[in-house]
Image: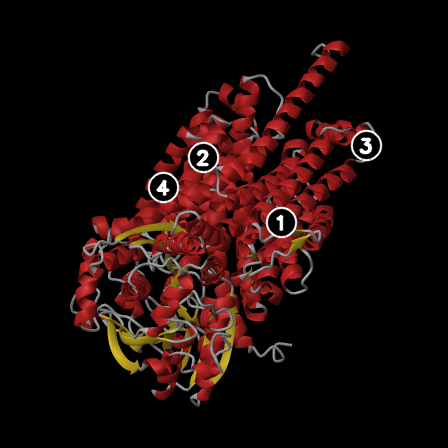
Amino acid sequence: MKSRLAFALTASLMLTSAALADDKVVKIGSLDDQSSLYADIGGPGSTLAAQMAVEDSGLTKKGWTISVIDADHQNKPDVGAGVARKWLDEDKVDVIVSLDNSAVALAVSQVGKEKNGVVLPSGAASSALTNKACNANTIHWAYDTYALANGTGKSMVKAGGDTWFFITADYAFGHQLQHDTTAVVEASGGKVLGSVNAPLNTPDFSSFLLQAQSSKAKIVALANAGGDTTNSIKQAHEFGLTASGQKLAGLLLFITDVHALGLDVAQGLSLTSTFYWDLNDGTREFSKRFAARMKNHAMPTMTQAGVYSSLIHYFKALEALGGNPHDGAKVVAKMKEMPTDDPLFGKGAIRADGRKIHPAYLFEVKTPADSKYPWDYYKLVATIPGDEAFRPLSESECPLVKK
Amino acid sequence: MTTSAPSPAAETAASARHERDEAIAFVVMTALFAAAPLAIYPFFMMQALCFALFACAFNLLIGYVGLLSFGHAMFLGTAGYLSAHAAKVWGLTPDLCILFGVFGAALLGVVTGALAIRRQGIYFAMITLALAQMIYFFCVEAPFTHGEDGIQGVPQGVFLGVIPLSNPWALYYVVLAIFLVGFFIIYRAVNSPFGEILKAIRENEPRAVSLGYRVDQYKLAAFVLSAALCGLAGATKAIVAQNASLTDVEYSMSGQVILMTLLGGMGTIYGPVVGALIVVAMQNYLAQSGQWVTVIQGVIFVLCVLVFRRGVVGEIARRFKLSL
Amino acid sequence: MLAALAISPQALFGQLLLGLINGAFYALLSLGLAVIFGMLNIVNFAHGALFMMGAFCAYFLLNGLGLNYWFALILAPLMMGVFGAALERLFLKRIAGLDPVYGLLLTFGLALIIQGVFQNYFGSSGLPYAIPAALSGGRNLGFMFLPNYRAWAIAFSLVVCVGCWFLIERTKLGAYLRAATENPALVRAFGINVPRMITLTYAAGVALAGLAGVLAAPINQVRPQMGENFIIVVFAVVVIGGMGSIMGSIVTGFLLGVVEGLTKVFYPEASNTVVFVIMAIVLLIKPAGLFGRAS
């Protein structure tokens, strides 16, 4: 009697666990700005990158069912968090990618932790995602403010640019970027001569550029993004900033911004990026396929490349686990275990705090004469190895890092 | 006098009919909302309820007093920030946080109202816009708001010490209760002697003045009431969404609430609720085809103004000769 | 005080001059808005989007038809004027006579549509438009480097502003316009085609917005959002100047540019907000605006 009961219990337990076993169904959600300021940086391009990752992983041939959906967070944290919540709660989305707005990424990262999903931001810049706001469900891909500061700051000081002036967008992202870059500049032996905070969405930077010119700093650094960056670069050109010997550094610049400015205006600009389409054969091969399928034939940005790379690694982790356990923390732990290798970012690793490590590169925008074919915009100036580019673990305030 | 006044009996019968229509509508609305989480994602419904309260409070001012404000987002957003800060940094219980937010919004309403009420029409609107932009600037600069990152990870806590808000069903019914309370306050305010005077001011302010009413005080009272209820919506929204951000104080949010009210029907009680539901639905469900959201909103504005001036509820009310 | 705030008188002059140049843009933009509000009582919220369309017209004229900046200065406003006339005929006529709130809401909706459509087709990064060769470069004035294009911008804006003011306040056509908006029935009785005047007036206001767009294209990135930032500032300018007054908008535009310029030196974070502080103060003290006539 007892043994029959025991047998029945064991059998039912086995059946239940069989029902909970990993399946081969994956749903991917690409959440970013599809309609306004940052649409060209992530947007429909990120969705395309996600689809290409699905195709290139070859998993559908192995019997997996993978779908990609996308949504527009309209740069509003509540819309973004609301969509993420619905996706993870109701729509059986397993992983959220892109997230090109730091405020939205922070909110979604929290939701991801609550609902045990996987969150892989490649567009957000805030280094808080792997610092104070880190959690076990988020891996920060592509870049962050620390890497940008390190890349541009350190390399330019080493190259002789030891006095700096900042034109900073007056919001958290701009201040963070200025703060991180200042730390790096001063640690490398440079000096910050001054800075000015410009309100967000300022159309005219002439006044701030004049202040930068009067400071006589060797480097004028733009701690802003999007339309503010392109406007300030265009007007810097107009006011002859570079002609009089100062160098302009765009702390956050994407290839689509350079394309929108034109080489005439953007030439000589210094910037840090972790991806450039023309860097090597691997990046070229992907980028040409990508551009062929993009509506405006644009080359992929760092964010879109990050979406592809993060998903390729995610699929590798799922394959290693033998199926999709629909358990975000488990998959992320697996992703952290495995070293990364993809044609876009090369060899790298993921640290305990969720930071993806790969090299960063300092580029200079070519002159029109040096550019030989469409989108031939950057000249490689320096390579910063991964372990130097990002915030060292010893400085991290992430609770996941065991000290 | 050009029109003949209806007989007293007909008037009483008409107002009794109105009350009956409105009571039925109230019951129907409450029932629908109570049952909604069975069919619709609760988080979306909670957002919609908060915005519905926001729109109703805004409608109090435009529909019944005739004052168009361009700056109402300042009440929504400020209350949201205060409530979020109280919950996250001071660790207060959600009921206290919401009260704190309402109080803050009401105080802001007194200050801004006192300034804005002095002017009328488009000038009133522009003053509210100017004040709202100044509040926006304050929110950008103040360290406690964390700029565009906003206040994240707001804890939901236990409501009144008994209801754990982390349970989505509990949270939903608490939000519904708050909405109904706010809605009821507006309903009572509108259908009271106070409300009649407000309507009189909207129709013909000089005559109201000549009748001896201190018009400015009534307008200010309506303004503060509207501000406080917007604050209630904003403070609740911060607890529901667990964040407070700059989007709630931007002038585009003021534009959204105008859209909701216009679409639903200005000057109807239920109009703003319907308008808010439609706009929030659009935002969330159309987010999937993100690129066209702006255009669609623009088309709705244009259509509403050209052919649909009474709004959804207004048209229904007229078609079926109801009072909504 | 200047020394304490660490700015030399030279640098200050530079900033003031830059402020004045910005003011020229504000004046030109608010001119169109003031014409439309003063004459037609329509609060044209689409003005920013129409400004953006003017800049895009310039881009297309250059990249599609090979017509450079100088052609664009004439053709783009004409194209925008035609578009404005169409908008007036199709949409604004239908709400004539209603509460001005509806005009505001309608134009707000139109602005959303225009901006959304451009956003979808042209993305957000924007398109390059170069400063015309004849105006490129600049001269070093000692206290600052002044790009030639900026000097041109301020001169051109002044000419257009003064010209418009003259046209409206001092010519017969202007008199007809003003009369037609004050008392359409009476003016119509004199045999003047009032509806056509109204359409033309709106078209003229839109053309002015387009002209400002062409002027801005070489120095601001040509993007669908470029009008968004200007629109509420320009509104504030018109309100401060006095909603019926053309001269008011012009003078206030320049004044505001200077005030903003000074704010950028001493409290740069507030430079986008200072206009609203001024607007609130003016509305509370003299609601008809600095130059307005109390109605």
**Disc 1 with disc 4 on a shared chain:** no
Residue neighbourhood size for the residue with mark 1, other residues' Cα within 10 Å, grouped as few (<14), some (14–19), many (≥20): many
Q: Secondary structure at mark 2?
A: helix
Please tell me in which quadrant of the rendered image residue B198 appears: top right
Q: Nearer the viewer, mark 3 or mark 4?
A: 3
- Going from the N terminus, do you reach mark 2 or mark 3 first? 3
Note whether residue C44 is visible.
Answer: no
Q: Secondary structure at mark 3?
A: loop
- How many numbered circles are shown? 4
> Looking at the rendered structure, which numbered label has been put on residue B213?
3
Kindly identify the amino acid type of the residue bearing the numbered disc 3: Tyr
* Between A57 and C175, the one nearer to me in the picture: A57
Q: Label 4 belongs to which residue? A: C80
The chain letter under disc 1 is B
Residue at the spot x=54%, y=59% of the render?
C272
Q: CA distance from mark 1 to mark 4?
A: 46 Å
Q: CA distance from mark 2 to mark 4?
A: 24 Å
Q: CA distance from mark 2 to mark 3?
A: 39 Å
Give coordinates of residue A155: x percent, y percent: 35, 84
Q: Label 1 belongs to which residue? A: B236
Q: Is residue B177 above or below residue C16?
A: above
Give coordinates of residue C67: x percent, y percent: 24, 51
- Going from the N terminus, do you reach mark 1 or mark 2 first? 1
